[in-house]
Image: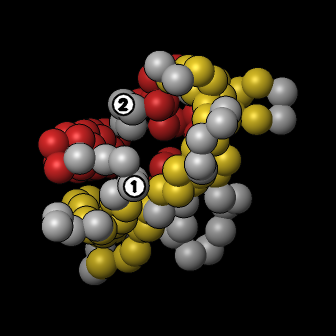
Amino acid sequence: MSEQVRHLSVSIAVPLARAYAFAHQPDNFPLWAAGLSRSLHHDGEHWVADTPQGPAVVLFTPPNDFGILDHHVRIDRQADIYIPLRMIAHGDGTAVIFTLLRLPDMDDAAFEADAQAVMTDLQSLKLLLEQQAG
């Protein structure tokens, strides 16, 4: 059976404080995270994204001193999707680590496509932050 967890990471040549200050803000997700965030918008007390399965409520970890950017995606009548995401200081830069958890009904092709989409998002975040710093 294929691996059930995959750790995907990038190194960003920007200090952790700057990278985290940008990345922890849900308003900035549409600038780098394609997936749900293309339609991410604030709706009252919640962040909501439009998906093919209907509206999804996205719950973000509150700002913290640990570089934790975890979030949960809730789609009606489906199990929550937990998305672990961390930023850690690495020298003068930041390491970003996304833990991709394979969903129970996900086949190999879908898991691989999800991993590729996450890497594209992480590369977008890297490019955006490094351009801002330049």
Relative placement, left or right, of 132 versus 54 is left
Q: Dot 1: what SS?
A: loop
Mark 1 and mark 2: Cα distance apart in space: 23 Å
Q: Nearer the viewer, mark 1 or mark 2?
A: 1
Tell me what residue is drawn at x 70 percent, y 59 percent: 62
Quarter of the figure with the N terminus: bottom left
Where residue 66 appears, as percent x and y from the top left, is: 56, 76
Relative placement, left or right, of 5 versus 20 is left
* Depth order, front residue of 65/46: 46
Q: Dot 2: what SS?
A: loop
Q: Residues within 10 Å of mark 1 (few under 14, many from 20)?
A: few
* Depth order, front residue of 67/112: 112
Tell me what residue is drawn at x 30 percent, y 78 percent: 90
- What type is the residue that disc 1 sits on? Pro
Relative placement, left or right, of 103 versus 71 is left
- What type is the residue that disc 2 sits on? Ala
Give the numbered dot on residue 77. Answer: none
Tell me what residue is drawn at x 63 percent, y 23 percent: 55
Question: Where 40 falls versus 9 (above or below)?
Answer: above
Residue 120, picture quadrant: top left
Question: Where 118 falls versus 101 (above or below)?
Answer: above
Quarter of the figure with the C terminus: top left
For this orientation, the residue located farthest to the right is: 44
Tell me what residue is drawn at x 44 percent, y 62 percent: 85
Where residue 92 appears, as percent x and y from the top left, is: 29, 74
Where residue 42 appears, as percent x and y from the top left, is: 71, 27
Give the numbered dot on residue 104. Answer: 1
The residue tagged 2 is: 34
